């Protein structure tokens, strides 16, 4: 699989990331381990985690795979996220966001324990916290970096102004902004998000690049926020491009994202080994400008001005 640099760091990883949020689905740990092994065999070297995925179970399952193969860790880029607190944690508390220094540090240390590693390659804030103090976050990041617990840092679901506020406080560049981007959710192309990534050398990671499966070849796992996405016309156009290419719809939808000059890294979340392998074919596909605009025009639903 092709590779890409992460931001302005020395990290290089696979052009597609494997998202580990479903590894613990149904409590079937072995199925989760098989999914990870399939991703490794298909060439994925970037693995995306969060402390809330499976309430920590997904990181533990991945850690078991690492423990099976000494030396495997060295070839991987491990990404994890923190900053979302469950309801009743502690008892009586509401579901909320938490960008406090204590929570950031504690969460990183917990992820490292569950994964069984000493250092996280990229550590992200999962959601923007309205109570976030950029100086406090920068202090937490700096402490983790100095302690050797995380190499690089970034954010997830941050608007450009929120990225800028945090970057001003940090003494080192943020390397990732992970946001929802797909043909069904293309607004980051025009709202300044990807423009900022290009200007500042930030790698955009695209979560739900298939719109919860609506744009893919397999099963759907649609979030409530994605239920209103109209994708019928898009699916028809994707199928037409896929047929002309002799490829699958999933690969075409992902190749559309890879065509952007910001060096986007789509996060593939299927636990089906066949679909994991099928998605990997996107990295071998270079979409033409004409194909890209053909799909973008349908995604917009109106002609370009």
Image: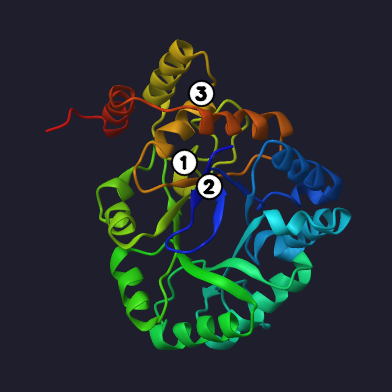
The residue wearing badge 2 is: 223
Label located before the other in sequence (1 or 3) = 1
The residue wearing badge 1 is: 227
Give the left or right position of residue 160, taking residue 91 as reference.
Answer: left
Quadrant assignment, res 244: top left
Check if mark 3's residue and mark 2's residue have beta carbons within 8 Å.
no
Assign a secondary structure to mark 2: loop
Residue density around tag 1, few if under 14, some if 14–19, many if 20 or more, within 10 Å: few
- Residue at 59% across, 35% down: 220
Residue 235: % across, % down: 44, 23
User: Which of 12 and 243 lies nearest the eye of the viewer?
Assistant: 12
CA gap, disc 1 to disc 2? 7 Å
Label located before the other in sequence (3 or 2) = 2
Residue 112: % across, % down: 72, 72
Residue density around tag 3, few if under 14, some if 14–19, many if 20 or more, within 10 Å: many
- Residue at 45% across, 88% down: 136
Check if mark 1's residue and mark 2's residue have beta carbons within 8 Å.
yes
Can you tell which of label 1 and label 3 is closer to the viewer? 3
- Residue at 31% across, 54% down: 198
The residue wearing badge 3 is: 249
| Residue 102 seen in the current view | yes
**Quadrant assignment for the C terminus:** top left
Assign a secondary structure to mark 3: helix
């Amino acid at each position: 699989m092709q590779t890409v640099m992460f931001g302005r760091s020395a990290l290089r990883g696979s052009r597609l990331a494997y998202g580990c949020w479903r590894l613990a689905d149904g409590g079937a740990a072995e199925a989760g381990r098989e999914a990870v092994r399939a991703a490794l065999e298909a060439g994925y070297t970037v693995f995306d985690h969060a402390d809330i995925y499976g309430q920590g179970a997904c990181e533990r399952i991945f850690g078991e795979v690492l423990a099976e193969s000494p030396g495997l860790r060295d070839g991987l880029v491990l990404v994890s996220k923190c900053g979302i607190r469950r309801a009743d944690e502690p008892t009586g508390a509401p579901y909320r966001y938490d960008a406090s220094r204590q929570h950031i540090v504690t969460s990183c240390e917990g992820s490292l324990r569950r994964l069984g590693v000493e250092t996280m390659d990229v550590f992200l804030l999962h959601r923007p916290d309205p109570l976030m103090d950029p100086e406090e976050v920068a202090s937490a990041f700096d402490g983790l970096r100095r302690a050797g617990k995380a190499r690089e840092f970034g954010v997830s679901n941050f608007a450009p102004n929120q990225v800028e506020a945090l970057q001003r406080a940090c003494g080192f560049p943020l390397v990732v902004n992970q946001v929802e981007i797909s043909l069904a959710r293309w607004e980051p192309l025009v709202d300044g998000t990807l423009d900022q990534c290009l200007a500042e050398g930030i790698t955009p990671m695209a979560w739900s690049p298939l719109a919860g499966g609506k744009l893919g070849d397999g099963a759907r796992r649609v979030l409530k926020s994605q239920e209103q996405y109209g994708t019928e016309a898009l699916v028809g156009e994707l199928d037409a491009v896929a047929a002309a290419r002799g490829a699958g719809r999933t690969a075409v939808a992902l190749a559309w994202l890879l065509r952007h000059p910001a060096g986007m890294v789509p996060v593939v979340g299927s636990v089906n080994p066949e679909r994991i392998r099928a998605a990997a074919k996107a990295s071998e596909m270079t979409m033409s400008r004409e194909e890209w605009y053909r799909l973008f025009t349908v995604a917009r639903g109106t002609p370009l001005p």
